[in-house]
């Protein structure tokens, strides 16, 4: 549903905005949009600020001030969300108040202006997979790698107005809207509506995936890959440098061996690995198993112990 709670006006935690911020953003609920011509920025006294009004990524509303804001001044930003002309909810006005702070040097195109990206964790276990519709998800066994992002100090003041894309081997893997990454480098988890994959998590399935999975849910092939993180600071006019990190996905499980090695790779879809596939609920339908979960559970039931097969 289209609700106020599903919209955001990305701001720093202290609501102090650099006076030279290139643009401010209103993020609508998933599948909705902001009427860009309704965007308004006013001072606390009600004086309008001259600005360009634009449609941004994912139907966000972008307001780019024509001149730097005045440090110490309180501002009010708002924009209309029509909720599909009232068909998906009651139209509302998204709004936020903030204070303009001193100007801060904008990030540049130098190699260190974005930060550092690296593999920080590898794990074998249940991976939550969104099926791309109705906010349904399944937990499927596989291997996943977590990428760690450390933002550069010069990027941190402008993170609320950065949107993101993670490519793997040159193909888009995940995206994240403005304000999805905080000063620690942590990314907002996928919600099954606006985003289907976590920005900084990559995975492969290990023979447990059900048939008919949508492209948004598919994993990568086991092996070595290269991830490229691409940040875009809204209306800055400067292309921020992309970050790369190599990683490897394998379906080996840690065996607890004395040498710290691995046991047999999990690559046979019919291998009885004893690891159940846990089906998750479908929130939009009010409960019950998702289609992917039912198929996965049926697959495990049909496998059964080999000793019981005729």
Image (cartoon, rainbow, N blue to C red):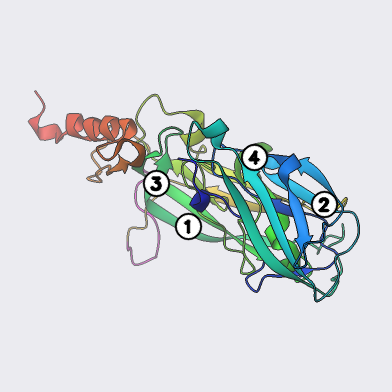
Task: Point out the tag, 2 or 3, that comes first from the N-terminus.
Answer: 2
**Could you classify mark 1 by the number of other residues whose Cα lies within 10 Å: few (under 14), some (14-19), or many (20 or more)?**
some
Task: Point out the tag, 4 or 1, that comes first from the N-terminus.
Answer: 4
Q: Is the magenta stretch mostly helix, strand or loop?
A: loop
- Residue 6: image location, x then y, percent: 51, 49
Task: Point out the tag, 4 or 2, that comes first from the N-terminus.
Answer: 4
Which SS class for mark 3? Answer: strand
CA distance for labels 2 and 3: 37 Å
Tell me the magenta residue range: 256-266
CA distance for labels 3 and 1: 15 Å
The residue tagged 1 is 122
Q: How many labels does the image show?
A: 4
The residue tagged 2 is 64
- Residue 147: image location, x then y, percent: 57, 57
- Residue 100: image location, x then y, percent: 78, 70
Which SS class for mark 1? Answer: strand
């Amino acid at each position: 549903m289209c609700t106020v709670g599903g919209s955001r006006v990305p701001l720093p935690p202290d609501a102090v905005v650099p006076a030279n911020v290139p643009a401010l953003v209103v993020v609508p609920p998933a599948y909705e949009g902001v009427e860009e011509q309704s965007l308004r920025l006013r001072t606390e006294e009600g004086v309008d600020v001259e600005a360009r009004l634009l449609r941004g990524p994912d139907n966000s509303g972008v307001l780019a001030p024509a001149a730097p804001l005045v440090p110490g001044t309180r501002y009010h930003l708002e924009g209309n969300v029509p909720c599909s002309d009232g068909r998906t909810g009651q139209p509302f006005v998204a709004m936020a108040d903030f204070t303009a702070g001193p100007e801060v040097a904008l990030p540049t195109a130098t190699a260190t202006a974005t930060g550092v990206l690296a593999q920080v964790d590898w794990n074998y276990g249940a991976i939550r997979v969104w099926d791309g519709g109705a906010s349904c998800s399944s937990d499927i066994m596989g291997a996943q790698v977590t990428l760690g992002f450390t933002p550069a100090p010069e990027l941190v003041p402008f993170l609320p107005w950065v949107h993101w894309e993670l490519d793997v081997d040159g193909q888009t893997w995940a995206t994240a809207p403005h304000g999805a990454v905080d000063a620690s480098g942590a990314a907002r988890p996928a919600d099954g509506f606006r985003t289907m994959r976590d920005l900084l998590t990559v995975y492969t399935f290990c023979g447990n995936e059900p048939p008919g999975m949508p492209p948004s849910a598919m994993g990568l092939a086991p092996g070595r890959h290269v991830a490229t993180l691409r940040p875009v600071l809204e209306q800055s006019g400067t292309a921020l440098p992309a970050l790369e990190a190599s990683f490897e996905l394998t379906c080996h499980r840690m065996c607890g061996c004395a040498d710290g090695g691995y046991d047999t790779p999990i690559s046979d879809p019919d291998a009885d690995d004893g690891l159940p596939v846990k089906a998750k609920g479908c929130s939009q339908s009010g409960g019950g198993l998702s289609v992917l979960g039912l198929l996965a559970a049926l697959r495990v039931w049909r496998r059964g112990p080999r000793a019981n097969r005729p």
